[in-house]
Image (tube, coloured by chain):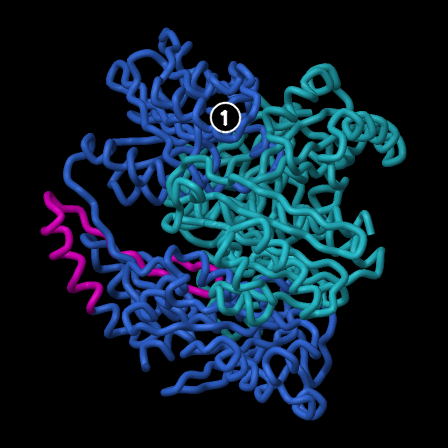
Chain colours: A cyan, B blue
Amino acid sequence: MVAEIICVGTELLLGDIVNTNAAFLSKELAALGISMYHQSVVGDNAERLKESLALALSRADIVLTTGGLGPTYDDLTKKTVADYFGLDMELHEPSVKKIEALFQRRNWPMTPNNMLQALVPSGSIVFFNDYGLAPGVAVENGGKTVIMMPGPPSEMRPMFIERISPYLQQKTGGIIRSKTLFIFGMGESSVEDTLRELMTTSANPTVAPYAKQGEVQVRVSAKADSEAEALALIDPVVEQIKQKLGSVVYGVDIGSMQNALVTALKQKGLVCATAESCTGGLVSAAITDIPGASAVFAGGVCTYANALKTKLLGVGEDTLNRDGAVSAETARQMAQGVRALTGADIGVGVTGIAGPDGGSDEKPVGLVYIAVSSPAHSDVKKLMLSRGHKNERNSIRSIAALHALSMMLEAARKA
Amino acid sequence: MVAEIICVGTELLLGDIVNTNAAFLSKELAALGISMYHQSVVGDNAERLKESLALALSRADIVLTTGGLGPTYDDLTKKTVADYFGLDMELHEPSVKKIEALFQRRNWPMTPNNMLQALVPSGSIVFFNDYGLAPGVAVENGGKTVIMMPGPPSEMRPMFIERISPYLQQKTGGIIRSKTLFIFGMGESSVEDTLRELMTTSANPTVAPYAKQGEVQVRVSAKADSEAEALALIDPVVEQIKQKLGSVVYGVDIGSMQNALVTALKQKGLVCATAESCTGGLVSAAITDIPGASAVFAGGVCTYANALKTKLLGVGEDTLNRDGAVSAETARQMAQGVRALTGADIGVGVTGIAGPDGGSDEKPVGLVYIAVSSPAHSDVKKLMLSRGHKNERNSIRSIAALHALSMMLEAARKA
């Protein structure tokens, strides 16, 4: 079964709002096992909407629209669809009553255009709107279905989940489930090279990689009649990918590196602490973004000034003079120092040059040292994180923070 | 002149990412006076992309695509457009050099698919990618133009602003300039109410508000023959808006609250420091995101554990026992304590309950105290940042961080 989305609204064409409805519906339809090959956006214009509708109906079994169901003169989706199929409009009585009740309760004057919201194409299936005034509508005609939903996400999303998804499940049968592998330390193209055969030969489950900043995720999705059957298709492929990729897979359905870290620390009953220079608090901010982080995070220091590195972390003045603030030895002393300062089990130290200024031939922008220290494990890494682009400060800092989290995760798992 | 956008990517059809590129480009094209009546999304499929391209070219003068320029087998936008126009592909040498340099510097093995990114349709106009590897491309053919851009917003947005917008301005005639007012402490609907008359009556310059998390920006844009003429139209309106809105306008074209703060500190020759609890490093991370922050930022501490608040910042144990860690007095002592610890001129202390757990009737989730301390000025604010939605931890932390930066900015300007 193939669906298409048409989002109606001049505000989308002007960029005044971001089209989150399309992403929401795409995900929901994929979860129902309904395929989609096209989405489109048109303004509040009957002629262009009718053309887009004709095109979508020529390619898909089901066309879902959002927007244009309200009371103003430019809300013309229902009328346009009714005209397309040669249907009259009729009042939907429960919606009439809801609109009248609201205006009475608020003591608002009722203008005639408000009742336009209660008009639906004759013979259509109506989805009552519990979160607003304009009902949703499905028109079934000649083997095709057009489903019209309100534009505001606060009305559209619950209406879809509560009323339209059950209606669609009757049509499709079967469910889709997926698992996502989280990968750090291997680029998207290498992941693809390694998994190419699997990706191209596997139809159910499907295997698809997605690049995120500094990370790659691989999603394995299967369609089946039941959750158990879907998982039986997915799990062996997840295992196969784990074996092919090795230790760069840091979790399955784990959400993020910081979530993996907080989870591992909780499991082991460990507490961590951070000493940051170039990342400026990004590592501690990431850890504390996870609810319940307070149980596993003692605290952090952001020692930008050298004097503070010595005062708080005990980094030797001789080390700063000899090796410099950006050095393996300084990172190591920062990691050890923050453990001593806070009493944490695992400490991390990050020092580097995020740019754009401050680089030299010997120590260029993008050079970052990260050290981790714990009773059972210590490590220090030298990273060159510049890719030679403009304005890299932000990405150098973010990727350095990811490495720091990853090294802490390794230390937690080894503890 | 009419344009259309085609966003290419199966991840959009699956709802894995929200299509922010379409909204960005819509706004930019509207600002250039270019009309748009349709947008569409297709997956990584050459046949369907070619059909969408043909349809878009039948309706528009300019078609802009995003996505599908990368190194993997499903990145097929450039090849598909070249095939459509019957063009061969050729290597773009500067992009080849950039890719080779990156792989050399990183000591990565070069796989052949990486060079695919440097292939462009022959005779096309190439927009070098300063923020990634795959260049953008324009193909002009038979009075129509197809402009292809990378999918990642971090590459697409600056490429559009720096290279493609000037290219389009040559086609449209005239230039567009704009200034943006940065507003904190007034909601979008209040800003709109206050500026409604100006927004609806002013055609050149146009006045448009945009809501960002916790902030509002108002952009004033004018079209004219020269920069001087455009600014002569813009500047009086910017002044008018400043007078109408008052002190909530914290800057014009200032980029961000943290940039305003770093700029103010530099102007006054002042140094700041941060003491964070619930924000976990977001304030220091924001400040250090600004290049050159090291001149005005001594350092920060993230004191999650109470013992650390006492040890590092000198917060009284009696205060913690009597008033609690989340209190005005604790915030005040944190702000003063971090000044003493670091020797900074301005200190900020943030303590609160970000949730989802840890709240009580007396101290609910969303309660945050922020104190600022400097020789000339001190202040403490009690904020209630919950809106009663689910999953608010992230927004409570971000908005608390904005308030902290805003209070430091006020202290810097008063110093």
Q: Which residues are magenta?
A: B210-239
User: Front-most of A340 and B54?
Assistant: A340
Residue visible at 46% across and 69% down in the picture: B298
Q: Amino acid at mark 1?
A: Phe
User: Front-most of A371 and B241?
Assistant: A371
Residue visible at 58% across and 42% down in the picture: A382
Say whether residue B150 is left or right of residue A197: left
**Quadrant showing the N terminus of chain A:** top right
Say whether residue A163 is left or right of residue B73: right
Instruction: Check the image and report above or below for B319 versus A38.
Output: below
User: Front-most of B185 and B130?
Assistant: B130
The quadrant holding residue B160 is: top left
Is A248 contained in the magenta span? no
Residue B202 drawn at (x, y percent): 21, 58
Q: Secondary structure at mark 1?
A: helix
Q: Can residue B250 be spotted in the picture?
A: no
Mark 1 belongs to chain: B
Number of residues whose C-alpha sits closer than 10 Å to that of mark 1, classed few (under 14), some (14–19) or many (20 or more): some
Residue B85 drawn at (x, y percent): 36, 10
Residue visible at 81% across and 59% down in the picture: A266
Is B228 contained in the magenta span? yes
Instruction: Check the image and report above or below for A256 versus B289.
Output: above
The residue tagged 1 is: B103
